[in-house]
Image (cartoon, rainbow, N blue to C red):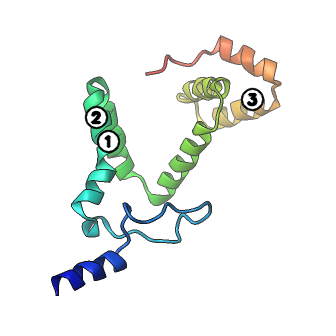
Amino acid sequence: MRTFTTLALALLLPCSALASPPQAGEDDARPMPAWEQLTQSQRDTLIAPMRARWNDNPEKRARMYEHARRWQDMTPEQRERAHRGMKRWRHMDPEQREQARALFQQMRGMSPEQRKELRDRWHGMTPEQRRQWVEQNPPPPED
């Protein structure tokens, strides 16, 4: 009976270690179980990268913790916007990232109207004008 139960669970519950990775466009095809239904091994697999980052970067722990805390406070819509922004960031080349950091730093203290004005000006600039603008408004050093 125990063997049958184990086999039935193995066939019914998706297992990240056994399941083939989703193909392009298939991300939601196979829903994974809730956290409480994951095995300890599956949970360890998910947590291991975070544990390594935490242990390898003691000077960044406070920042990592603050990011996690802020993530918990976000609405689903805010999280989705953050995911889209992270995806855009991954696809930027180094020059585009430098420009984005400079724009973000500049816009931090601006009112919504001032931000819109800067965005409109930015979109009207040539690549050379953007480079000059970044030279005059350098981004803060990277962490």
Kindly indicate whether the residue at mark 1 contacts the one at mark 2 (C-beta within 8 angstroms): yes
Q: Residue at x 29, y 45 (%)?
A: 48
Question: x, y (%) of residue 78?
Answer: 49, 52
Q: CA distance from mark 3 to mark 1?
A: 37 Å
Task: Give the labeled residue for mark 2.
Answer: 54
Kind of residue indicated by mark 3: Trp
The correct choice, above or below, for 18 with respect to 102 in the image is below
Is residue 5 toward the left or the right of residue 74 in the image? left
Q: Nearer the viewer, residue 24 or 90?
A: 24
Return the residue found at the far bottom.
Answer: 1
Dot 2: within a 10 Å radius of its alpha carbon, few (fewer than 14), some, or many (20 or more) residues?
some
Question: x, y (%) of residue 39?
Answer: 25, 64
Q: Nearer the viewer, mark 3 or mark 2?
A: 2
Kind of residue indicated by mark 2: Trp
Question: x, y (%) of residue 83?
Answer: 52, 49
Q: Nearer the viewer, residue 112 or 129?
A: 129
Q: CA distance from mark 2 to mark 1?
A: 6 Å
Return the residue found at the far front.
Answer: 3
Q: Residue at x 27, y 70 (%)?
A: 37
Task: Give the labeled residue for mark 3.
Answer: 122
Is residue 112 toward the left or the right of residue 46 in the image? right
Dot 3: within a 10 Å radius of its alpha carbon, few (fewer than 14), some, or many (20 or more) residues?
some
Kind of residue indicated by mark 1: Met
Q: Quadrant of residue 104?
A: top right
Q: Secondary structure at mark 3?
A: helix
Question: x, y (%) of residue 87?
Answer: 58, 44
Is residue 101 toward the left or the right of residue 32 in the image? right
Task: Give the labeled residue for mark 1.
Answer: 50
Kindly indicate whether the residue at mark 2 contacts the one at mark 3 (C-beta within 8 angstroms): no
